[in-house]
Amino acid sequence: MNHKMFERNVVILAIAILITVSIGGLVQLVPLYTMEVTIEKVDGMRPYSPLELAGRNIYVREGCYLCHSQQIRPFRDEVERYGHYSLAAESMYDHPFQWGSKRTGPDLARVGGKYSNEWHVQHLMAPRGLVPESVMPGYPFLAKKELQAADIAQHMETLRTVGVPYTDDQIANARADLAAQARGTTGDVEGLQGRYAKAVLGDFDGNPARVTEMDAVVAYLQMLGTLVDFTTFKPEYGRR
Amino acid sequence: MADRETDVLTGTETTGHEWDGIKELNTPLPKWWLYTFYATIVWAFGYFVLYPAWPSFSSFTTGMLGYSSRAEIAETMDQVAAGRAAWAEKFATTPVEEIVADRELLDFAMAGGKTIFADNCQPCHGAAGSGALSYPVLADDDWLWGGGIEAIYATVQHGIRSSSEETRVSEMPRFGADETLTPKEIASVADYVLSLSGTAKATEEGAMLFADNCAACHAEDGKGMAELGAPNLTDGIWLYGAGKAAIVAQVTAPRHGVMPAWSGRLNDVSIKQVSIYVHSLGGGQ
């Protein structure tokens, strides 16, 4: 091919660059505009409750994803160990998603409900107290730190701008819902459960007097993978 | 600038560019590399046509092979289920008590139960049911809710203080926190409880308090009641720690452990397998 044409004429060069970059851009962008049809329709998915969202932020802050994926792949060994393979719909409200294939610890996509709250607290405080062969670091400071979540409504608004369907009602009640879920017995619990189906109620960290980061992390862990109603889910084999 | 100029030393064409007398060689790409590169392009087109590749506005291209990883795993799991069908059917229809009596079924239960236990139960109950502080040992003959195979099966299915409707529930009153007993009374009842396993001297007061407040669940002799989940207090096995301080703490504001219900998370065959495995760990009654 005659390169001279591109190298000698800046207009032709610019057009050629534009075409090349456009192809690369389209390959990345077009799928994003078809998410409506490529994410399967399921019953039960909802955005994170304020407490779960706060817990998720701590999960990301502490880098849990470096060792734990949240993606059960459609292979026999994974399905038999962890449960139903993960669906695209299950991470559609995740920003950023927590997929991965590098696991030092087990996959956590369906850890919700698998252990008791007490177990999670003890395990986060001192993993080797319960699982002698574990290499996970301890996170005892989570139980000491008061949860800083005054800006939780703003977090939810931010997520709304990138497509998470938080309602005005949910954002207006964010702080009250967070407190109600973490205490479990006081506050507008019915309102919370109306806004967030299947929300697991605290007290998670065994200390009802305070809402700690431990409360938030355990609330998040206890809901992972529990939302989708698999009794009504029909796998569409056309999807990958 | 001459277009086709050949370098004398290497015999390779130059690009014709020259900087301060230095000319740039235009060495061609190795042939093997070039053809591999072309082959990958052809491969990509083939892949594009054969496999799911590109979204459209209402769906996406499914590819000529009709491949789907979801169909593949469904098929794999169907095969797995078919391979286990003969066993699974027997397990589904046979009560756990009879499974234990059948040598062949028992072997199948033990093999599967061991793996299921390691995956799901070991984080709390320890390897081979060795237990941990606040998680019962499953290898001894001290059972909170009964150590018969049926009782274990029911516990695994529905859990303890779980979200299941049929969960086992017991709740010891908060004698100290709710001020039913004074700290002094709790101390003497703790001494009495310790005396049951011969590790402390009991007082008359302690015995009276025990009879009035504790015997209803833990039985008059302190041996507990499995129907209520009330532990045996005479055997020196302590879920929340040995010693007077631990007992005082438990009487003052009891801790209540939670075991999840496994129905729904595990299928019935797996639950039967793991129940039989637990029953075999050393303490099954």
Image (spheres, rainbow, N blue to C red):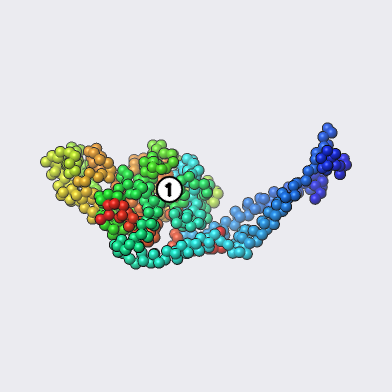
Whether residue B150 is visible to the viewer of this picture, yes or no, is yes
Instruction: Give x and y (percent) for residue B118.
Output: 39, 51
Residue furthest out toward the right: B2
Q: Which of B101 and A163 is in front in this view?
A: B101
Few, some or many residues within 10 Å of mark 1 (<14, 14–19, 20+)? many
Instruction: Give x and y (percent) for residue B23.
Output: 82, 37
Considering only vertical position in the picture, is B65 above or below B211?
below
Instruction: Give x and y (percent) for residue A143.
Output: 38, 39
- The mark tally for this picture is 1
* Amino acid type of the residue tagged 1 in the rendering: Leu
Residue drawn at (53%, 63%) of the image: B71
Dividing the picture into quadrants, the one containing residue B46 is bottom right
Residue B26 horizontal side relative to residue A228, left or right? right
* Element type where label 1 sits in the image: helix
Residue drawn at (61%, 64%) of the image: B65
Q: Which residue position is annotated with label 1?
A: A221
Considering only vertical position in the picture, is A37 above or below B197?
below
Whether residue A90 is visible to the viewer of this picture, yes or no, is no
Residue furthest out toward the top: B20
Residue drawn at (62%, 62%) of the image: B63
Residue drawn at (60%, 60%) of the image: B52
Q: Nearer the viewer, residue A112 or B237?
A: B237
Chain ID at mark 1: A
Residue furthest out toward the left: B204
Residue B39 horizontal side relative to residue A93, left or right? right
